[in-house]
Image (cartoon, rainbow, N blue to C red):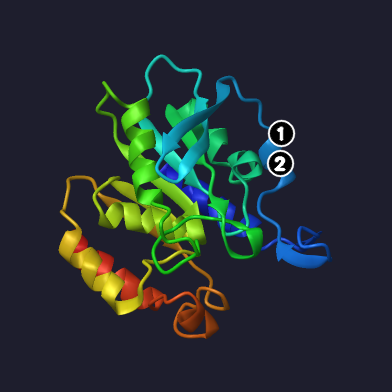
Amino acid sequence: MSILLHAILLASAAATPPEALSDLGFSFNLPKVGVKECRKIQLNGSYEYRTISRPEGDRHFFVYTPAVTQVRALVLNLHHLGGSCHTFREQSCIVNAADKNGWLVVTPCGLPGPLGFNAFNAGSCCQTDKTIDDYGFMKDIIALLLDTSSIPVYAVGFSNGGMLAEGLLCRNIITRAVSVSGVITNGQEGLKACRESYQPSAGARLGNVHGLLDPLIPYYFGPGTFIFGTPSIPDDMDTWAANFN
């Protein structure tokens, strides 16, 4: 599916040289996300910055409406820990394919979490305020934008956003997902909960793009296993194989 190809572009962009940031008052390096070429594409549709009220307060998101006569799908574009909806809406490159494919692209904004970095509550990672219900936030966005429409809803996420994308699929909120450097959260218990809650649907798909040397969300086992409470990627894929069969 074409959305997977754009997610692979996102993954390759994440491997570009690091950029210096100083959000904490001192310089440190984080991997760059996005490439300049992604921002050179002429977009014919329109952006809108919207707000909805939630129990945790006002929540914000960008909506890109493609220049088409018929929208074919809503795509949630989910940023990483420390990401920003203001920049990720372009950095992910997903919006570049919106006009061609008829995607209504929504880039939700995470709330400040650990050390002030924006994050989503996907379970055991990465939002420290567990009263924030980002699954409810996504459901509210979908209900608002598709109140009279029955088009499918997909999600593409990077790292923390990939975790949320997989969690949305576990909860049957979406029908297809691409997870770049993401995984189901909450370890083996999370995998079990996903198997129990997931209801097979026609056309359901999951694409996972993950590096073997990822130190934060390790492919097999590493520091991130303890820090973020994540299972191995093979166990994650085994869960989805069981869900889809």
Along the line of sight, which residue is nearer the eye, 101 or 139? 139
Residue 15: percent from left, percent from top: 66, 63
Q: Residue at x 30, y 78 (%)?
A: 188
Along the line of sight, which residue is nearer the eye, 44 or 223? 223
In what quadrant of the picture does the N terminus appear? top left
Up the image or down, 146 lies above or below 194; here it is above
| Left or right: 34 as drawn, with respect to 46 | right
Mark number displayed over residue 37: 2
Along the line of sight, which residue is nearer the eye, 233 or 9? 233
Residue 144: percent from left, percent from top: 35, 28
Residue 141: percent from left, percent from top: 39, 35
Q: Quadrant of residue 186?
A: bottom left
Q: Residue at x 64, y 59 (%)?
A: 116
* Tally of numbered discs: 2
| Left or right: 230 as drawn, with respect to 192 | right
Q: Residue at x 47, y 83 (%)?
A: 226
Mark number displayed over residue 40: 1
Along the line of sight, which residue is nearer the eye, 217 or 123? 123
Up the image or down, 28 lies above or below 64; here it is below
* Kind of residue sitting beneath label 1: Lys
Work out whether residue 197 can be spotted.
yes
Residue 115: percent from left, percent from top: 65, 64
| Label 2 close to label 1 by CB (< 8 Å) | yes
* Kind of residue sitting beneath label 2: Glu
Q: Give the SS element for disc 1.
A: helix
Q: Give the SS element for disc 2.
A: helix
| Mark 1 crowd level (few <14, some 14–19, many ≥20, 10 Å Cα) | few
Q: Residue at x 50, y 64 (%)?
A: 128
| Mark 2 crowd level (few <14, some 14–19, many ≥20, 10 Å Cα) | few
| Left or right: 30 as drawn, with respect to 213 | right
